[in-house]
Image (cartoon, coloured by chain):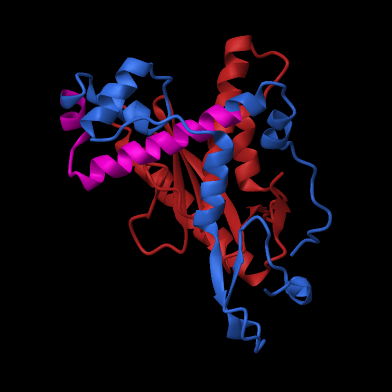
Chain colours: A blue, B red
């Protein structure tokens, strides 16, 4: 096996794209679009609807539904509302910060006290969000209530 | 979960990085082409990041288990009539390894079905080979920036 330290320098298209001034804007748009596409697909599958059936209900075509679910098109408000209503969902505009907080709450996981082998009576659970990753060397720094 | 490109020490390339070079922006590109490439990179990046935040699962149409007994899964990202598939797996729940990728035409041209299927099968075998190589030497990777 060749020495992996002598890695040939290759172009990194993602790192290059990140430097583009418009990339952040596109990345944020795409992130929201991915969330929407997943929600539509999952709800459709849960309801046992085919793309064709959903298209009929939303007065559009199967191709459009497929494109929405694959993040291929930029859909207008009217169309997306029709699709969402047909699935029994509704659009809600939320504060981005509020959304982040809720996500952090959802992502929070709890560790049983004995995981740390500490016999403090006060602390039963330690909550830690994903953002504050626990590294093994950080265990000593975790404060218990 | 950290995202990494599998680096093949024998051929001295990171296959996924090489694959993504088709979306690398060049100075000869027209503005529409540039925009399309940026949006595609943003979509691919969004899907990969979503998986890394969600224990390797994206949901929706973006990831699917492969038919057959393979040790990896695939991201499924459409670009018009072309279906990009990026093979990946989660290594000890702390690394998402991007093994290799293939673009598979969505609509088969007449008489080309067998050829496309053969190519796809070859790509799967290659990804399996990369998987085994990575398991043998888990330092064979490049950072995803």
> In the figure, residue B37 lies in which quadrant?
top right
Residue at point 64% right, 40% down?
B18
Image height check: is B81 above or below B2?
above
Q: Is residue A81 magenta?
A: no
Region in magenta: A27-56
Left or right placement of residue B55 versus residue B142 in this view: left
Quarter of the figure with the C terminus of chain A: bottom right
Q: Residue furthest right?
A: A6
**Pick the front one: A65 or A76:** A76
Closest to the observer, A140 or A55: A140
Closer to the camera in the image, B94 or A140:
A140
Residue B127 visible somewhere in the drawing: no
Q: How many marks?
A: 0
> Residue A33's spot in the image, x, y percent?
46, 31
In terms of image quadrants, where is residue A55?
A: top left
Q: Position of residue B107 (x, y in %)?
A: 32, 29
Name the residue at 40% across, 48% down.
B59
């Amino acid at each position: 096996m060749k020495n992996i330290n002598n890695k040939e320098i290759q172009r990194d298209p993602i790192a290059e794209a990140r430097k583009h001034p418009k990339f952040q804007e596109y990345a944020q748009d795409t992130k929201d679009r991915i969330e929407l596409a997943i929600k539509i697909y999952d709800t459709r599958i849960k309801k046992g609807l085919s793309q064709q059936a959903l298209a009929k209900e939303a007065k559009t075509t199967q191709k459009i539904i497929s494109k929405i679910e694959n993040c291929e098109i930029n859909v207008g408000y009217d169309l997306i509302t029709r699709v969402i209503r047909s699935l029994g969902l509704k659009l809600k505009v939320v504060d981005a910060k509020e959304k982040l907080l809720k996500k952090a709450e959802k992502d929070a996981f709890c560790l049983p006290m004995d995981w740390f082998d500490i016999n403090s009576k006060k602390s039963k659970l330690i909550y830690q969000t994903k953002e504050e990753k626990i590294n093994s060397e950080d265990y000593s720094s975790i404060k218990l209530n | 979960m950290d995202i990494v490109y599998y680096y093949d020490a024998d051929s001295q390339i990171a296959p996924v990085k090489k694959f993504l070079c088709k979306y690398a922006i060049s100075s000869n590109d027209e503005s529409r082409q540039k925009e399309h490439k940026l949006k595609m990179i943003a979509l691919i990046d969004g899907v990969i990041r979503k998986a890394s935040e969600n224990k390797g699962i994206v949901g929706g149409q973006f990831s699917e288990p492969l038919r057959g007994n393979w040790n990896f899964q695939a991201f499924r990202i459409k670009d018009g009539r072309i279906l990009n598939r990026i093979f990946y797996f989660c290594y000890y729940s702390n690394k998402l390894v991007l093994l290799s990728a293939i673009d598979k035409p969505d609509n088969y041209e007449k008489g080309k079905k067998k050829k496309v299927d053969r190519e796809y099968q070859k790509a799967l075998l290659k990804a399996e080979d990369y998987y085994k190589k990575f398991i043998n030497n888990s330092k064979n990777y490049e950072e995803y920036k």
